[in-house]
Image (cartoon, grey):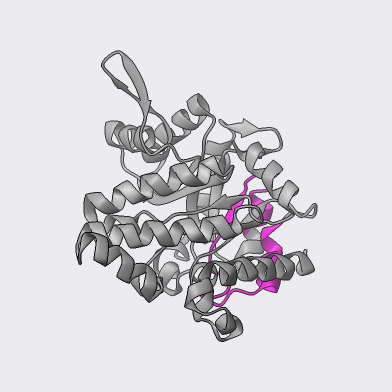
Amino acid sequence: MISQLIEKIQKTKAPVCVGLDPMLSYIPEHIVKKAFEEYGETLKGASEAVWQFNKEIVDHTWDLIPAVKPQVAMYEQFGIEGLTVYKRTVDYCREKGLVVIGDVKRGDIGSTSAAYATGHLGHVKVGSRTLAGFDTDFITVNPYLGTDGVKPFVDVCNQEDKGIFVLVKTSNPSSGEFQDRLIDGRPLYELVAEKVVEWGDQSMDKGYSNVGAVVGATYPEMSRILRKLMPRTYFLVPGYGAQGGTAEDLRPCFNEDGLGAIVNSSRGIIAAYKQEKYKDFGPENFGEASRRAVMDMVADINRVL
């Protein structure tokens, strides 16, 4: 699967991923009003607004980008109705030819971990039929439970030609409370990185592994270390833009050939119309504002690469 993502990155010349993380506060009033008129101020109404918002963002950006990353929590907050829209969004993006990274941060052990992997990446046996659940191409995985928690995901990746991104060094300010703790003189994130390489060796796809790593743009010096430790591991990089990461901060995440990383931006793209830079588009043309924000992001990153 990672080779397919790389092909799309090379084709679009855009190592970027749009995070479809919709909050009702991001959605223009006219979209919300229409959804509420049809379904009321209900979970169904809120979910319909999310769907219409997502669809317009995707319709205005799909030809510019290789991938999207819907964050499942933004859908789960609306219950079953929200999860239905999550699945609808995944399917719509795949129809558009986009690689879909489900940001689900799952991780458990044994049959539970295997069920998560099956539900998000694989197929489940239902009577005489074998059916896909959410059917994303990649998901994010929490490594806290160690190999017991990650191996079931790697197994499904190998069976289904799918991929995962394991949390290694995240972009949030408190990530260092655990990830930077020294163990035998080394920070924990380095030890996790070495396990990611070990797990990835079991799922190679041409030059890179289907087992990638989440590495935040907000810690460029750590990114440089991790790039050396994981030369054949693809990085999913959050933290650009709204969280403070710059294009210059991203450079250590990439290999010398310009590959090795895909950079995510969520509200910087989907809520671009709220920014001063794109205010002239207005709420009615929020999709066009998102398109322009993608183009600006791609140009900014390629300027550095």
Q: Which of the 4 image quarters holds residue 148?
A: top left
| Whole-percent x, y for residue 165 in the image | 51, 48
Residue at image x 20%, y 67%?
41
177 vs 205: above or below? below
Going by the image, does 221 lie left or right of 122? Answer: right
- Residue 250 lies within the magenta run: yes
Q: Magenta span covers which residues?
A: 226-254
Tell me: residue 129, above or below residue 176: above
* Depth check, front residue: 110 or 273: 273
* Image x and y of residue 257, in percent: 80, 52
Q: Position of residue 57 (x, y in %)?
A: 51, 61
**Residue drawn at (62%, 46%) of the image:** 233
Closer to the camera, 99 or 282?
282
Picture quarter with the N terminus:
top right
Query: What percent of the width, then of the height, locates residue 111?
Result: 28, 31
Q: Is residue 195 visible?
A: no
18 vs 1, nearest the viewer: 18
Q: Is residue 248 above or below residue 157?
A: below
- Residue extending farthest to the top is 128
- Say if 76 sits above or below 90 in the image: below
162 displayed left or right of 277: left
Residue drawn at 66 percent across, 37 percent down? 3
Q: Residue furthest bottom?
A: 276
Quadrant where the image shows the C terminus = bottom right
